[in-house]
Image (cartoon, rainbow, N blue to C red):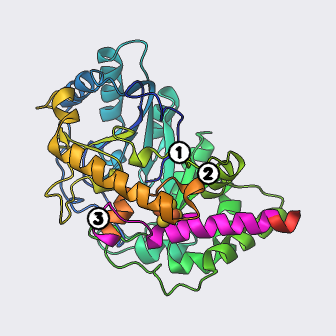
Amino acid sequence: MRTGGHDSRHTGHEGVTSLVILQPTPFCNINCSYCYLPQRSDRTTLTIDQLQRVFEKLVTFPTISKRTTVVWHAGEPLVLGAQYYDAAFARIRECCPPDLQIDHAFQTNGMLVDDEWCDLFRRWKVGVGVSIDGPKHINDAYRKTRSGKGTFDKTVAGIQRLKQNNIPFYVISVLTRAALEDPDGLFALYHELGIRDVGFNIEEQEGIHTATTVDSDLPPRSVQDFLRRFNELMREHDFHIVVREIEETMASIRHFDKRGPVNNLVIPFGIITIDVRGDVYTFSPEIAGYSSKDFETFAIGNIFADSFAEIETSKVLKAMTAQIASGVELCRTSCKYFSVCGGGAPSNKVFENGTFASTSTTHCELTKKRVTDYLLETIEAMA
Ligand code: SF4
């Protein structure tokens, strides 16, 4: 998951966390071949009483911003049913202070969306992100059911249901090599479905997904060529799509600051992730449940067992903070893209390079460097 920046970098603890990733269950109804979640068959679920305990503890964290988004993720959140979230959201509202605004959001494969879900999304103003990777043959090559069938038709049916109910949503598409080679196919799908807001996640080497189709032997200009063609199609069809990677990189270029943009992924408590056992993580959400040669666990504490003071002073947090900071410093001194990147994603560094104290990854090469090159070339051509 990629997250946007916010502007509280220099404010110490006060209001650092505006994003909480909460795993109500690791279970997922499908079995994508690039998925990094090892426990996606585990049906353990946080009860409503446990959720109350999670939020009663969370509000004691001095880092929690007065406006915080909770993304229910890391498994398929909709498998728990709309009634679960009606009860959960009501309990959370009861137990949190009235001046804390919590916005709920789901990242879903969309296959279970029906009118009952749309009613819940509307009543609770839930942000909805749907994962679909492009045309049927590209989507279904990786996004498969547990019996190996494609998921495209059901996801499209879910998207149609959202549209019939006027529920705003955005789409996240994982760009595999096949997707990168077919910007026309991806654009045609978004155009046909009326999708105006897209995030592209380049397929990553992450956790148990160790082999990606998007690796170092990718043709050097494939990302730029993809974006250029995508942009041409938008103009030809007079159909504008907000592409998150373009918007974020453009914002960093416009507000150039040699210290780099705010990068929540490298700030302690910038993002908090809580898994179904109550284990607490910070920095990249993708590190939840993993380890490295230097860290037996990346968990910095447990929301049920530990106070904020214990979590904040945990040895794991101290050591991770130091290693991540040294990786950012290496980026700052060695990479000409630092001013638009801010030091990258710790998860990609540790999964690709074995340590947070490192710099370039295939992921940053494709999502930061080549996107920046594309934008600078485009700006130059317009001058
Ligand atoms: S683009 Fe890569 S190497 Fe450069 S600052 Fe970002 S993470 Fe570091």
Q: Residue 301: name its quadrant.
A: top left
Q: Quadrant of the C terminus?
A: bottom right
For label 1, the residue is: 4
The secondary structure type at the circle numbered 2 is helix
How far apart marks 3 and 2 lie (CA) works out to 26 Å
Q: Is 317 positioned to the left or the right of 2 in the image? A: left
The secondary structure type at the circle numbered 1 is loop
Badge 2 density bin: few <14, some 14–19, many ≥20, Cα 10 Å:
some
For label 3, the residue is: 355
Q: Is 357 positioned to the left or the right of 135 in the image? A: left
For label 2, the residue is: 248
How far across and how far down the image is residue 147, in percent? 29, 72
Queried on whether the Cβ of the residue with tag 3 lies below 8 angstroms from ligand 1, the answer reads: no
Badge 1 density bin: few <14, some 14–19, many ≥20, Cα 10 Å:
few
Q: Is 182 positioned to the left or the right of 265 in the image? A: right
How far across and how far down the image is residue 315, in percent? 15, 44
How far apart marks 2 and 1 lie (CA) works out to 7 Å
How far apart marks 3 and 1 lie (CA) works out to 24 Å
Query: Are the residues tagged 2 and 1 within 8 Å (C-beta)?
Result: yes
Queried on whether the Cβ of the residue with tag 2 lies below 8 angstroms from ligand 1, the answer reads: no
In depth, the one of 217 and 239 nearer the eye is: 217
Q: Quadrant of the N terminus?
A: bottom left
Upstream in the sequence, badge 2 or badge 1? 1
- Location of residue 15 with respect to 351 vertically, above or below: above
Badge 3 density bin: few <14, some 14–19, many ≥20, Cα 10 Å:
many
